[in-house]
Image (cartoon, rainbow, N blue to C red):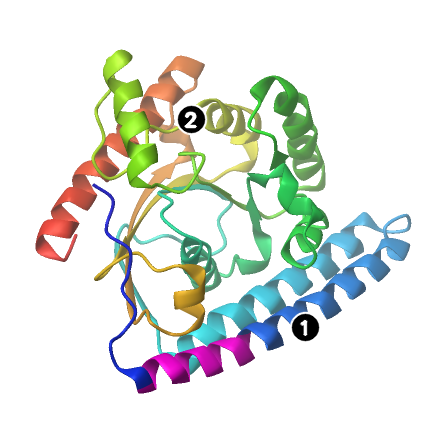
Amino acid sequence: MPLKPLRDPQGIFRRVTGTLVGSLAAIFLFAVLIFFNSLQTASLVIKPFSVTAFRAFNRWAADTWWGLCVKVAARVWGVKIKVSGDNVPMRENSVVISNHQEMPDITVLMWYAKSKDRLGDLKWFVKDSIKYFPGIGWGMLFLDCPFIKRDWTSDKEYIKKVFQRILKGRVPLWLVTFAEGTRITPGKLKQSREFAEKNSLFVPRHVLIPRTKGFVATVSEMRQHLDAVYDVTIGYIDGVPTLWQWIKGYVREVNLHVRRYPIESMPSGETELSDWLMERFKQKDELLEGYYAKGQW
């Protein structure tokens, strides 16, 4: 089963302090984000003259604001993120697949990207509705993040155009996909297990059956631009935190396990790529089973 939700600390002092400092941090970060949105909007004036300069500015904006989010977690609350598994080189172009439990997963992956000098080059597969949200959604519009409606028929051509812009501009890239398509919950896991049983797939315990079409299209279209695919598994301790619990500093440690697959080792056929992703999530499920039992990978 998914790891249980993180419980708030019992001490009233820590809860009050967390709420106060977390509220101040959230207000500060959101104010800075809206300011950066205004700068990003202003950067549209340079796009007709230099797409390269436009992208460079917005990369800087993303790197700076996301970097603030990482620094607040590390310096204000002292969150430690431990990485095991393969040693990933600096500044590679990659597709990153990860399990998805709650919103703090995103900040954890931002920390990991920053450690590899790819924070400003992060792009995310995100719900189409997010682009209407001030702050994060508006900011992602300037970064060529693929906004998807979860209907492959309507998403396919749009995503292909996004990839073509990245390829044409030789844009540095860490493209993150939560292939499960949504955050895991007991109810969603139950549905995923029923789907797996009906379709003779592995029956998951700690992940959802991944949606393979987007991943297959990404690797197929972007292969020439990629150095590797990273398989990242996120493991929390004591429970899965909400974003508000993360902001209040209730999380002290997160563990990542990383596997790196060179692009030349990846299969080329659609069926083979789909099977490859399914096998990775089967291994994630087994990895999390051991992690929850022993407290380590």
Q: Which residue is mark 1?
A: 31
- What residue is drawn where x is 21% and y is 62%? 238
Q: Secondary structure at mark 2?
A: loop
Q: Secondary structure at mark 1?
A: helix
For the record, the magenta segment spans 13-25
Say which quarter of the image contains residue 139: bottom right
In the rendering, at what x and y percent does residue 106 appear? 46, 54
Mark 2 residue type: Arg
227 drawn magenta: no
18 drawn magenta: yes
Answer yes or no: is residue 269 visible.
no
Say which quarter of the image contains residue 247: bottom left
Mark 1 residue type: Ala
Discs 1/2, front: 1
- What residue is drawn where x is 30% and y is 56%? 240
Q: Which residue is mark 2?
A: 211
Residue 284, above or below 83 = above
- What residue is drawn where x is 79% and y is 64%? 38
In the rendering, at what x and y percent does residue 7 appear? 27, 64
